[in-house]
Amino acid sequence: MDLKMFPANDDHPSHDVYEGQMFVKEVYETLRSSPQWNEILFVITYDEHGGFYDHVETPVRGVPSPDGIIGPEPFLFGFDRLGVRVPTIMVSPWIEKGTVMLLVRKKPPEIPTEFLRNSNSWVLNQFASHIEA
């Protein structure tokens, strides 16, 4: 709920992005001051691009359908195009300051089984089809 007395703490329009960014900062500062900080990877992934500038245009040709499924009438969507890229920010003492990763994948990621053994069942279910034993 977005009220003057209780402003929303997200980056969605029509909210004040200052509140959303202050929330991210509060979580970061809490993690940073934790005794577990040297074992933490803080991942911030937005669920949409939200107007963030992207210098790479979304490909519209030559995008393979991942499974050949076609959507129902009347649109018959072929799942053969990509959406906008979304920003993901990773913060950790393990990541060198100023690191920028540019990654293009031709196939789904291979998830190490060590990660899966130490993760909850939701994560396991999400990546089950990509597990390399």
Image (cartoon, grey):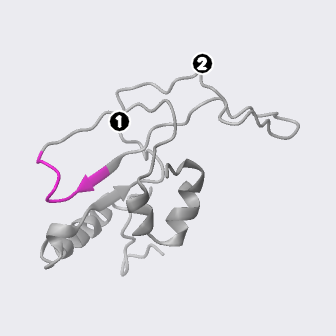
Of the two numbered discs 2 and 1 in the rendering, the one whose residue sits closer to the viewer: 2
The mark found on residue 22 in the picture is: none
Look at mark 1 in the image and give the residue it sits on: 53
Quick check: 27 left or right of 56? left
Tell me the crowding category of disc 1: few under 14, some 14 to 19, or many 20 or more residues within 10 angstroms, Cα based.
Answer: few
To which quarter of the image does residue 60 belong?
Answer: top right
Residue 36 locus on image (x, y percent): 18, 76
Residue 131 locus on image (x, y percent): 52, 51
Residue found at the very far right of the displayed protein: 73
Look at mark 2 in the image and give the residue it sits on: 62
**Nearer to me, 2 or 83:** 83
**Nearer to me, 106 or 111:** 111
Task: Please tell me whether residue 37 is drawn above or below residue 95 in the rendered image.
Answer: below
Task: Please tell me whether residue 85 is drawn above or below residue 90 in the rendered image.
Answer: above
Quick check: 97 left or right of 105? left
Magenta segment: does it hold 96? yes
Residue 118 locus on image (x, y percent): 39, 69
Q: Secondary structure at mark 1?
A: loop
Q: Secondary structure at mark 2?
A: loop
**Nearer to me, 95 or 98:** 95
**Among the two numbered marks 2 and 1 on one chain, the one whose residue lies closer to the N terminus:** 1
Task: Please tell me whether residue 99 is drawn above or below residue 106 in the rendered image.
Answer: below
Magenta segment: does it hold 30? no
Residue 66 locus on image (x, y percent): 65, 35
Q: Amino acid at mark 1?
A: Tyr
Provide the residue span drawn in magenta.
89-97
Residue found at the very far front of the displayed protein: 133
- Which residue sits at x=74%, y=33%? 68
Q: Magenta part mainly helix, strand or loop?
A: loop
